[in-house]
Image (cartoon, coloured by chain):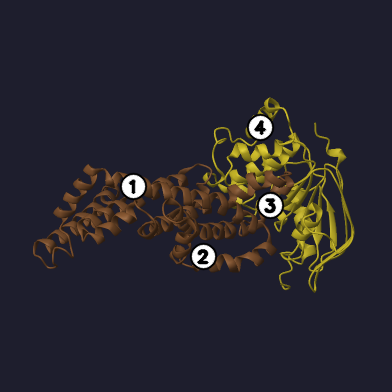
């Protein structure tokens, strides 16, 4: 037990250090020109720079804010829509093809519209995040509701759960574990999309930072932003994963 | 608080079919208040259909059904809400009690009754199969239920737990009498529990034998009355040990 725990901590660190070493060696022996592949040292230096000017912090806040607004909006709308569709067969038949269509439409395809409708600033990025996450969330919630074992509804009927009581005390808790999984997946999509969204319609943000680094041929800065994006994405997913530890949803992951 | 003699449960000339398959044909069944009626029969003969008709989950194609009293069902498994604790699951049965203090008192009593003190805050997936079914029993007898429909409630359990659960059920019903319709394929279980065993024929099901068992409960597996009744039922089903040629 203890041995496997130690391994589970040390092995990823070893892999990470290995990758860093390879990167360092490739840069050290100039296998690629320095402008095409910045060295770890250069990236570290630009890290310090970005931190000192406060630009990095500002970009992080800007990106997190946009993702939060877009994502929360799509949770607030997508989950209820999914709950409703899951309970109504005819509505499901009517709407699912269209929802699926939009789900497979890359959110980036909306960029021209986003800029035309919302100009520049937070709004187009928020809109793109919403378009990227609403459809998968609604569809996942719907599928979860549609597959609730009928026995729960029979029991609910025996104990006189009706209307809003039935929805909040039976239907919703029955799908909550799957909704949490859907949240993690769609949050992942949102975090991927924000980078592209900020490259076009924004004046700040992590995506914009990469775009600007490219314009100034500062790939060291670009890599520094990439590292921040990856780490933040992982960190927030870990936070969302904490939801799976709530006592009322454990059953969904342990059976 | 609870008056089991308010309950009434009757099937009058009920027939039912799924598509072209006729499942029940002109079935008559009347359950007396406080009685334990056990339905046995070959698998697929329509036992569960009868329970579904009694509970109102499906509508009969013809005939009439009389239901009076609050009906609750115990299922073979997964009847508990997995997102609720033992306490919360049992408290579902007490929803109609407005006084919170009284509800808590009832809840504590029920948990004591099924010997699950200390497990109040456990979730169903943290319990054994037998414990889960005990929680189900506590839930259906909680509050003001009159009629219990049991759809093979112990079939998913191992033999020893099954024996214990039968005893448990009898003990609970002694404390809190209810009208019970119990479906099982287990003839031993039927004869240990029932006031009246109804043996069903193959599809379309009719009652081909009615057997009253008067012996006091709890009855042991090896009690004379139980063994005698089992012989009768086995004979009716064509499964008697002395007659193995048919099969």
Separation of marks 4 and 3 at Cα, in angstroms: 23 Å
Q: Chain of mark 3?
A: A
Hue used for the chain lettered B: yellow
- Is A23 in front, or is A116? A116
In this figure, which residue is indicated by the disc labeled 3?
A: A153
- Is B181 in front, or is A72? A72
Q: Which mark is residue A60?
A: 1
Residue at the (80%, 74%) spot, across then down: B20
Separation of marks 3 and 1 at Cα, in angstroms: 45 Å
Separation of marks 2 and 1 at Cα, in angstroms: 27 Å
In the depicted structure, whether residue A252 falls above or below residue A100: above
- Is A197 in front, or is B139? A197
In this view, the mark in front (3 or 1): 1
Disc 1 secondary structure class:
helix
Count of labels in the image: 4
**With A200 as the anchor, is A29 left or right in this view?**
left
Separation of marks 3 and 2 at Cα, in angstroms: 30 Å
Residue A251 is situated, as x and y percent measured from the top left of the image, at 52, 48
**With A122 as the anchor, is B188 left or right in this view?**
right
Residue at the (77%, 37%) spot, across then down: B144
The brown chain is A
**Mark 2 burial class by Cα count in 10 Å: few <14, some 14-19, many 20+:** some
Q: Which mark is residue B107?
A: 4
In this view, the mark in front (3 or 2): 2
In the depicted structure, whether residue B73 falls above or below residue B27: above
In this figure, which residue is indicated by the disc labeled 2?
A: A103
**With B140 as the anchor, is A38 left or right in this view?**
left
């Amino acid at each position: 037990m203890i041995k496997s725990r130690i391994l589970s901590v040390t092995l990823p660190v070893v892999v990470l250090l290995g990758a860093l070493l390879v990167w360092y060696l490739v840069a050290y022996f100039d296998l690629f020109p320095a402008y095409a592949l910045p060295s770890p040292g250069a990236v570290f230096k630009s890290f310090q720079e970005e931190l000192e000017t406060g630009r990095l912090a500002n970009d992080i806040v800007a990106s997190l804010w946009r993702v939060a607004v877009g994502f929360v909006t799509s949770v607030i709308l997508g989950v209820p829509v999914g709950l409703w569709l899951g309970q109504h067969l005819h509505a499901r038949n009517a709407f699912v093809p269209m929802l699926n269509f939009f789900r497979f439409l890359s959110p980036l395809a909306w960029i021209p519209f986003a800029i035309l409708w919302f100009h520049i600033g937070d709004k187009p990025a928020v809109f793109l995040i919403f378009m990227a996450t609403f459809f998968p969330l609604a569809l996942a919630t719907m599928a979860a509701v549609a597959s609730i074992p009928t026995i729960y509804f029979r029991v609910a009927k025996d104990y006189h759960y009706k209307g809003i009581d039935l929805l909040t005390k039976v239907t919703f808790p029955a799908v909550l574990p799957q909704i949490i999984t859907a949240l993690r997946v769609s949050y992942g999509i949102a975090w991927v999309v924000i980078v592209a969204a900020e490259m076009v319609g924004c004046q700040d943000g992590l995506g914009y930072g990469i775009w600007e680094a490219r314009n100034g041929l500062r790939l060291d800065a670009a890599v520094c932003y990439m590292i921040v994006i990856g780490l933040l994405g992982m960190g927030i997913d870990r936070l969302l994963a904490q939801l799976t530890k709530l006592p009322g949803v454990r059953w969904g992951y342990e059976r | 608080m609870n008056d089991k003699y308010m309950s009434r449960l009757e099937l009058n000339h009920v027939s039912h079919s799924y598509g072209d398959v006729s499942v029940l044909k002109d079935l008559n069944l009347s359950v007396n208040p406080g009685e334990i009626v056990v339905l046995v029969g070959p698998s697929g003969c329509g036992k569960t259909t009868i329970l579904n008709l009694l509970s109102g989950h499906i509508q009969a194609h013809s005939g009439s059904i009389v239901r009076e009293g609050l009906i609750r069902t115990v299922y073979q498994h997964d009847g508990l809400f997995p997102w609720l604790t033992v306490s919360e699951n049992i408290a579902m049965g007490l929803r109609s009690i407005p006084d919170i203090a009284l509800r808590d008192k009832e809840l504590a009593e029920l948990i004591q009754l099924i010997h699950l003190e200390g497990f109040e805050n456990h979730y169903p997936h943290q319990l054994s199969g037998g414990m889960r079914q005990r929680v189900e029993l506590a839930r259906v007898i909680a509050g003001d239920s009159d009629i219990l429909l049991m759809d093979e409630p112990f079939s998913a359990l191992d033999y020893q737990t099954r024996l214990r659960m039968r005893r448990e059920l009898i003990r609970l019903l002694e404390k809190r009498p209810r009208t019970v319709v119990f479906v099982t394929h287990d003839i031993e279980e039927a004869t240990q529990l029932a006031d009246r065993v109804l043996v069903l024929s193959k599809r379309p099901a009719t009652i081909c034998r009615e057997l009253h068992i008067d012996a006091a409960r709890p009855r042991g597996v090896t009690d004379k009355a139980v063994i005698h009744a089992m012989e009768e039922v086995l004979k009716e089903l064509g499964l008697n040990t002395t007659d193995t040629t048919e099969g």
